[in-house]
Amino acid sequence: MTKRPFVWFLFCVTAVVIFILDAITSVDMPISVLYVTLIMIVLRTGSARNILIAGVTCCILTIASYWKGTGFNLTKFNGTGLVDVFISLFAITSVTYLSIKIVHSEASMRRARDQAARTMLGVSINELATSVAHEITQPIGAAAVNLAAAKRWLDMTPTNVLEVQEAVDAAYSSTARAEGIIKGLRRLSAVASADRTSFDILALIREVIAFLLHEIEGNRIRVSEHFYQSALMIDGDRTLIQQLFINVINNALEALSHSQSENRNLTILARATEGSASIEVRDTGSGIPPEHLEQIFDPFYTTKARGLGVGLAISRSIVASHGGSIQALHNRPTGTVIMIRLPLSERANAHD
């Protein structure tokens, strides 16, 4: 991961070297063209503003080195030195423009990808909700009709006990059908957790960080890992646990990306505590109001303008299905801490 202070240090050192070579060397070649390498270095920051600053600086240095060599003597304006300056300026401005276009294109692709993911998730949730509502509404509606009929039979004089019994039995059958549908949905959701294996959760977290590296570098976020054991083995569905940490870490990255502070830190701590793997994901973002700390795990609750509010709700379900716990706390002085506890592998406990 390229850190911005290192990029600017490398930029300044290289710029000084090129400037000195350009000012004191008399060879017939445009040494100042080498400034384009500085643009490529700054491109690693992923900031169009930084690239523009670097491009303007390189142009100024190119003109300054020519001025130092000629003093802008009008009699030398037609010499090869001036041609070299124009070649260098053209190369620098072209690379600067193309680099800015690359940054804008990557940003547009990320936005499009995120929007597509949100759209697909929204469509899936809408389809699921519609399907469930349709399946459950039918037996519940039938039960309501039968109970209303039973009430009418009871109000009649004389009371038709047989008709009342038939209506109540039909209502009971309808409610039993609705219960069966709900149990079927629970079994369906449990299928995803059926494939459980033993794996190292620390290695999985490192994989998630590598997966999100583009967002980390693009938003100039410093990630620190503090793992107090070499490995923490747990039993579970590796795919679901991976999705859990993608949700939690990605939420922290989004909070940091909107932070106005330069202190954008994401710290992940992991240790073995009383038979559990204890993982803390700490960010230095703007934080969450105290009254909302528990609500963030509720389905469809979100503090994002364009969020769906299902990521952390899904995360809580994943943790619960693995016999663990998850909670949100304040990070001091600012930000949020997500604490996750998952039972260690039985084999790991037996080995201990």
Image: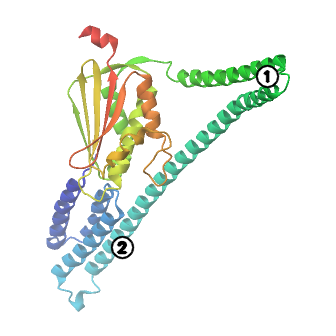
Q: Residue at image x 27%, y 61%?
A: 38
Where is residue 318 drawn, in percent x and y?
44, 28
The numbered mark, 1 or 2, whose residue comes first in the sequence reads 2
Q: Which quadrant holds residue 86?
A: bottom left
Closest to the observer: 4 or 263? Answer: 263
Q: Which residue is mark 2?
A: 90
Where is residue 76 drawn, in percent x and y?
23, 87
Q: Is residue 323 above or below residue 285?
A: above
Closest to the observer: 78 or 56? Answer: 56
- State how the image is colored: rainbow
Where is residue 92 drawn, in percent x and y?
33, 69
Residue 167, which numbered label?
1
Closest to the observer: 311 or 140? Answer: 140
Q: Is residue 30 visible?
A: no
Instruction: Please state which of the two labelled residues, at mark 1 or mark 2, is closer to the viewer.
Output: 1
Q: Residue furthest front?
A: 157
Q: Residues within 10 Å of mark 1 (few under 14, many from 20)?
A: many
Where is residue 146 drawn, in percent x and y?
77, 27
Q: Which quadrant holds residue 24?
A: bottom left
Q: Residue at image x 28%, y 76%?
A: 85
Q: Is residue 330 visible?
A: yes
What's the amino acid at mark 1? Ala
Q: Which quadrant holds residue 294?
A: top left
Q: Is residue 32 above or below residue 144?
A: below
Q: CA distance from mark 1 to mark 2?
A: 87 Å
